[in-house]
Amino acid sequence: MDFGDRPALYADPIPISLISGDRCRGSGTPASIIFMQRILYYFLLLPFSKLPPGILYGLADALHFLVYQIAGYRKKVVLANLSRAFPSWDNHRIKVVAGKFYRHLADLLVENICSWSMDATAARQHLQVVNPELLDRYHDQGKSVIIVIGHYNNWEWIAAMLPLWVKHRTIALYAPLSNRFFEKKLKAARSRFGTELIPKGDAVRFFADNKTRPPFAIVFAADQSPTFSKQVHWTTFLHQETAVMLGAERFGQRYDYPVVFGYAEKTGRGRYILRFELVAEHPAQSPNGEVTERHTRMLEDQILAAPQYWLWTHRRWKRRRG
């Protein structure tokens, strides 16, 4: 069975290479850059992560102005994506939602840096799971589950904080950095509460090796643009012909693991609620494409309700049919 692209959950809101120097690959990174990366982490980012929320979100407001109004980070991509996704909107409404998106993007950056110092008590205040019993009953039956989410609201916190709410081992796929220093620091932050990080290239082996072990809940981000795989599901998503990765569905069918969608709602700055909804209890009995179509519609409904919280900076529709 071709499982297609394995989507990495962690697609950083502002490319981590801007902070980590991850584009300096191999052993040729100058010693001065390595030194500066450590200075940046220990004397700026780590102390920053310990600041009170009021100061942090004040800095996020300044960052919003810098990123959106001055730097215009991927502004053309964001405006083009919104215009195609909402063809009936006029330019004024597009720009209003874009502004709200960049404000949320700034919040994401400071929130995810906070993860480097956050304790479990604070984490449970930032993310609440309203119906963990939906997953817990599968755990009690000895069943692993597949959780599908989008790059919507704070997806990093969702994956990192799930172990505080569910009985399953929590697994998340990620794309390792070539920068070993920031790879170590980011991995530690993302696994702070017990989430196990698996390189996306090891997904097939992980499923094979863990099918008889204690049940796990693995988180898939299903809204990235597929790259190399010919095995995709074509559908209409946000008014556009869209290729959707089949990874969650194919693994669900192969092992007959229940597939669950995670609805995320932002209730305030740094406050999120997560609600699970069953997509398919027995994916092995579903026709090809049905599970993917269902969770794609769930994600679309979520975006239509509050579009400012989706990650509009990515070129989601760069792949064309044919």
Image (cartoon, rainbow, N blue to C red):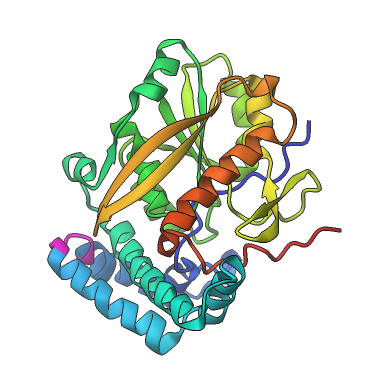
Q: Residue placed at 41% from the left, 33% from the top?
A: 276
The residue furthest right is 322
**Highlighted range, magenta:** 48-53
Residue 313 at x, y percent in the picture: 52, 69
Judge left or right: residue 108 versus residue 47.
Answer: right
260 relative to 271, above or below: above
Q: Nearer the viewer, residue 70 or 210?
A: 70
Judge left or right: residue 131 versus residue 300.
Answer: left
Residue 196 at x, y percent in the picture: 44, 36
Is residue 49 inside the magenta stretch? yes
Q: Residue placed at 58% from the left, 70% from the top?
A: 81
Is residue 107 inside the magenta stretch? no
Q: Residue placed at 55% from the left, 52% from the top?
A: 175
306 relative to 245, above or below: below
Answer whether residue 243 is visible to the viewer in this image.
Answer: yes
Q: Residue placed at 59% from the left, 76% from the top?
A: 80
23 relative to 191, above or below: below
Q: Nearer the viewer, residue 70 or 199?
A: 70
Answer whether residue 9 is visible to the viewer in this image.
Answer: no
